Amino acid sequence: MFLIFAILLVVVVNLAGAIFWVFMLIDCCKKDFKGNDKVVWIVLMCLTAWIGALIYYFIGRDRALASAASAIPGNE
């Protein structure tokens, strides 16, 4: 019984991580960044999977929002 629960838990965690990774990859592709930052984030997420997506979620999304806000004329 414990083995079935452990396998099910591993499958659910990996599936959730994969779904999260896909959503963060799509989010990164839609956002505007300065210079080559978008390419760097995409490569980082592709090489590190859900860990890179987690780093992007906490660090990269804020940088994308900040660069998009600074691109608006008169918004400094």
Image (cartoon, rainbow, N blue to C red):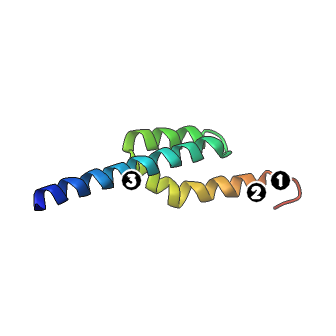
Front position in the image: 49 or 76:
49
Asked which secondary structure carries label 1, the reply is loop
Q: CA distance from mark 2 to mark 1?
A: 6 Å
Looking at the rendered structure, the kind of residue marked 2 is Ala
Front position in the image: 45 or 26:
26
Looking at the rendered structure, the kind of residue marked 3 is Ala
Q: Which residue is mark 1?
A: 72
Q: Pick whichever of labels 2 and 3 is earlier in the sequence.
A: 3
Q: CA distance from mark 3 to mark 1?
A: 35 Å
Asked which secondary structure carries label 2, the reply is helix
Q: Name which residue lies at 65% across and 46% down.
A: 31
Q: Quadrant of the N terminus?
A: bottom left
On the rendered structure, is 5 left or right of 38?
left
**CB under 8 Å between discs 2 and 1:** yes
Asked which secondary structure carries label 3, the reply is helix
Q: Quadrant of the C terminus?
A: bottom right
Front position in the image: 17 or 3:
3
Q: Which residue is mark 3?
A: 16
Q: Give the total number of marks visible in the rendering.
A: 3
Q: Please provide percent x and percent y for residue 49.
A: 39, 45
Q: Please provide percent x and percent y for residue 42.
A: 51, 40
Q: Please provide percent x and percent y for residue 55.
A: 46, 56
Q: Which residue is mark 2?
A: 69
Looking at the rendered structure, the kind of residue marked 1 is Ile
Q: CA distance from mark 2 to mark 3?
A: 31 Å
Q: Please provide percent x and percent y for residue 3.
A: 11, 57
Q: Pick whichever of labels 3 and 1 is earlier in the sequence.
A: 3
Which quadrant of the view contains residue 45? Answer: top left
Seen in the picture, residue 27 relative to 62 is either above or below; the reply is: above
Seen in the picture, residue 65 relative to 45 is either above or below; the reply is: below
Q: Name which residue lies at 76% across and 57% down.
A: 69
